[in-house]
Image (cartoon, helix red, strand yellow):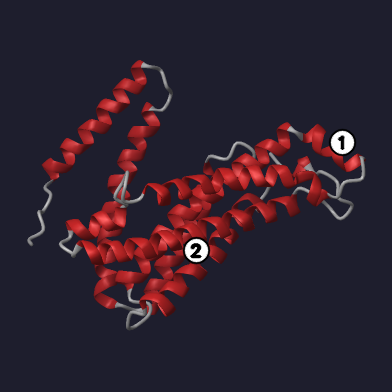
């Protein structure tokens, strides 16, 4: 089965739909038309550049360059976690919490998959390592960002309730536990929905890509199942770690609510 090559005209026709959507958003005064077009331009530029970088990287298969690429992806993902947070931690803490949670979830699970599950030779083969890490970081990023935004927003909005609970003798852990649960639920629901709908409502991205690339559907299914389990684990563990770190940051050794640490 031959692969159908797309031309710039084909991409332009797809881009026309995004432009029409931006026009409609301006007509409805949604306030997202400019952001949509900027995001579309960034998509073209960033994916074009990464395509050239990956071509060079795939030709070399050097651990150093794979590590550099992975580090850049991780650092940029840490920035994206805080980009749309309504309430952020002051100083470098917002970036640090998100980046740390992604590192300890995405990197660990990706390494586990490369060393134990897939076992390519060598284990850092970029054709496997970079796409797997990219999918892990992207989905973990979404989960952490949603959880953090919900948690800090709820703590800020319900600050009088939290302080009242602390004054009544509750520990910090018990006082904020309901808000942590809500935040984690918000962060994990998109991943759970994606798993529940896979195959019946939607064909996930990696599976679709492999099928379009000519791989047998059964092989694509096996890879997609593995990826979805990895994503669910990474998103859940990452969100839990981020919320735990946030809870520690919003209190002190006297178990007081420290809203001065939010901006």
- Which quadrant is home to the C terminus? top right
Observer-nearest of 17 and 47 = 17
Residue 222 found in image quarter? bottom left
Q: Is residue 92 above or below residue 257?
A: below
| Mark in the foreground, 1 or 2 | 1
Q: Is residue 241 left or right of residue 105?
A: right
Q: Residue at x 29, y 55 (%)?
A: 49
Residue plotted at (86% across, 55% down):
253
Measured as percent of width and height from the top left, residue 160 is found at: 81, 32
- Tally of numbered discs: 2
Q: Position of residue 211 (x, y in %)?
A: 20, 58
**Residue placed farthest to the left in the image?**
2
Question: Residue most toward the front?
Answer: 200
Residue 188 appears in the figure: yes
Q: Residue at x 58, y 53 (%)?
A: 239
Spatial separation of the CA atoms under disc 1 and disc 2: 37 Å
- 143 or 204, which is in the foreground? 204
Q: Is residue 73 visible?
A: no
Disc on res. 106: 2
Where does residue 180 sit, x and y in percent of width and height? 68, 47
Number of other residues with Cα within 10 Å of mark 1, as a class: few under 14, some 14 to 19, many 20 or more = few
Q: Does residue 50 appear to the left or right of 153 in the view shown? A: left
Of labels 1 and 2, earlier in sequence is 2
> Between residues 116 and 11, which one lies in front from this camera angle?
116
- Contact, CB < 8 Å: mark 1 with mark 2? no
Question: What residue lies at 46% left-to-right and 50% top-to-bottom?
Answer: 191
Q: Where, quadrant-wise, is the N terminus in this rendering?
A: bottom left
Foreground residue, 248 or 43?
A: 248
**Above or below — where is 198 with respect to 55?**
above
Q: Is residue 129 left or right of residue 192?
A: left
Label 1: which residue? 164
């Amino acid at each position: 089965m031959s692969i159908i090559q797309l031309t710039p005209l084909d991409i332009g026709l797809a881009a026309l739909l995004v432009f029409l959507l931006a026009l409609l958003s301006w007509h409805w005064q949604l306030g997202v038309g400019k952001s949509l077009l900027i995001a579309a331009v960034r998509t073209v530029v960033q994916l074009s550049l990464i395509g050239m970088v990956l071509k060079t990287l795939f030709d070399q298969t050097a651990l150093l360059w794979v590590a550099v690429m992975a580090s850049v992806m991780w650092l940029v993902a840490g920035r994206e976690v805080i980009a749309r947070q309504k309430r952020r931690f002051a100083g470098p803490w917002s970036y640090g919490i998100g980046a740390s949670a992604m590192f300890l979830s995405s990197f660990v699970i990706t390494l586990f998959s490369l060393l134990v599950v897939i076992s390519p030779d060598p284990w850092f083969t970029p054709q496997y390592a970079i796409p797997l890490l990219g999918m892990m970081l992207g989905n973990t990023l979404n989960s952490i960002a949603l959880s953090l935004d919900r948690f800090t927003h709820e703590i800020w909005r319900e600050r009088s309730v939290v302080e009242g609970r602390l004054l009544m003798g509750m520990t910090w852990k018990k006082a904020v536990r309901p808000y942590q649960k809500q935040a984690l639920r918000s962060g994990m629901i998109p991943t759970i929905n994606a798993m529940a709908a896979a195959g019946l409502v939607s064909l996930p991205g990696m599976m679709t890509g492999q099928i379009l690339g000519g791989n047998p559907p059964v092989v694509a299914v096996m890879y997609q199942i593995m990826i979805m389990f990895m994503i669910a684990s990474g998103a859940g563990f990452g969100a839990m770690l981020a919320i735990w770190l946030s809870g520690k940051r919003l209190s002190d050794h006297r178990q007081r609510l420290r809203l001065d640490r939010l901006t």
